[in-house]
Image (cartoon, rainbow, N blue to C red):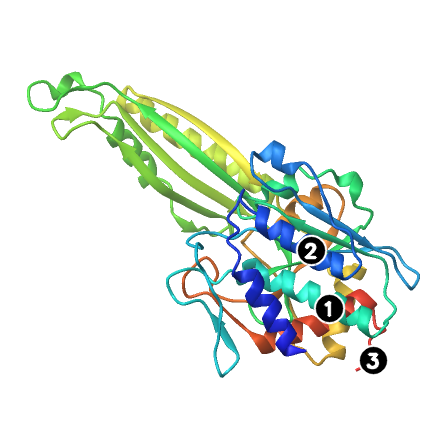
Amino acid sequence: MKNRLWNTFKELTDIYSPSFGERQFCDALKKRFSLLGIDLKEDGADKILKGNSGNLYGFIPGKTDGPAILFSAHMDTVEPAYGKRAILHEDGCITSAGDTILGADDVAGITVIIEAITRLKERNIPHRPIELLFCAAEEKYGAGSSVLDYSLIKAKEAYVLDLSGPVGEAANAAPTIISFEINVRGKAAHAGFAPEDGIHAIEAAAKAIARLPQGRLPSGLTFNIGQISGGKAGNIVPDLCTVKGEIRSLDHKAAVSYWDEVIIVFNDEAKAKGAKAEGNKRIEITAYETPPELPVIRRFVRACEKLDIPCNIRPTFGGSDLNNFALHGIKGLVIACGMNEVHSTREYSNINELEKCVKLVMELMADGEVQL
């Protein structure tokens, strides 16, 4: 079984599948699931996103009573990914060659889903109706799932395989993420001959930034200014300074409220210098929380206990497709699936963790019907 698991993982990681460029990966999944007797249908998200692949949806009729459960993972990876290949080491660790990411985010999740369904079919294990969703461009703030036609989805519960950490960890809450840009506009002047005629946009912006603490704030919200640009030359008083940053909070209202505070500070400091500040924000994803008493969480805990897997349910400060699912009434968990140090060339997985996750997902699909 582990040989097949490894072969699937390797074959999928070999495919170059950047955000908005998942065509080859999408076609490979259609072919693989067709061999399992499952027809994956592609939506028209590519036309909206101007990519070359839509989202993939599939339905597997149930053999037991109960509503459908959605299992989801995403098809795209971050860069650098061109030419990536997976290497299996003697201790079971899986890495890239070191010059690219591995792509376990999210090939690990997709591989686990494929293997779990394959084993259920091979062993004729009863299961509830299963819906499958493989999303495009998740790494771009869930772009694919943001334009999905949710009338396709019947399930009200979901497990999204897209979390770092040991198998058994899961996230039941994730933040609102607001990205923003602020332009402080001053007045250019020669810095040597007539500096008093200028209005220093960078100075005004710097004073505003100095008033705004960076990092994790006492409220739990995170605030970061990650880019500053401006000025034309060392001898010219800069007439424009552009600041870009991000706000994250598990409380949506708190994130929006803090943006209001940020723009007030920039307006105050700009006005004090005779400059003007103009800001715009974009809510990339919206916070959600899945209450611990819901069946989707209780089922996960029960499955971990049956398999003797330590269970740890916690919030995460990273987003996923579940943020978008939650906006459409789908409650769920993002579960760890054998990915570590993602978004870096140090990314790694482990064949034993993948195997453990397959057994866990089989339990979730069969809801206690799997005989160990």
Mark 2, Cα crowd under 10 Å, few <14 / some 14-19 / many 20+, is: some
Question: In the rendered structure, which disc, 3 or 1, sits on the residue that comes first in sequence?
Answer: 1
Which amino acid does the dot numbered 2 rest on? Lys
Residue 137, given in percent of the width and then of the height, sits at: 57, 45
Give the quadrant of residue 125.
bottom right
How packed mark 3 is, by other alpha carbons closer than 10 Å (few <14, some 14-19, many 20 or more), is few
The residue at which mark 3 appears reads as: 371
Q: Given the image, on which type of amino acid does mark 1 rest?
A: Ala
Locate residue 284, reporting x and y percent: 55, 39
Q: Earlier in the sequence, mark 1 or mark 2?
A: 2
Secondary structure at badge 1 equals helix
Q: Secondary structure at mark 2?
A: helix
Amino acid under disc 3: Gln
Q: Is residue 91 left or right of residue 190?
A: right
CB-based contact (under 8 Å), mark 3 and mark 1: no
Return the residue at label 1: 116
- Dot label at residue 310: none
**Could you say where residue 230 lies in the image, as x and y percent from the top left?**
26, 30
Q: Is residue 253 left or right of residue 156?
A: left
Q: Is residue 76 left or right of residue 326?
A: left
- Residue under the point 69% across and 52% down: 30
Residue 56 vs residue 35, the one in the foreground = 35
Look at the image and tell me whether residue 338 can be seen: no
Location of residue 132 with respect to 199 vertically, above or below: below
Can you tell which of label 1 and label 2 is closer to the viewer? 2
Q: Which residue is mark 2?
A: 31
Residue 165 seen in render: yes
Q: Give the Cα separation between the discs numbered 1 and 2.
A: 17 Å
Is 200 left, or right, of 116 in this rendering?
Answer: left
Q: CA distance from mark 3 to mark 1?
A: 14 Å
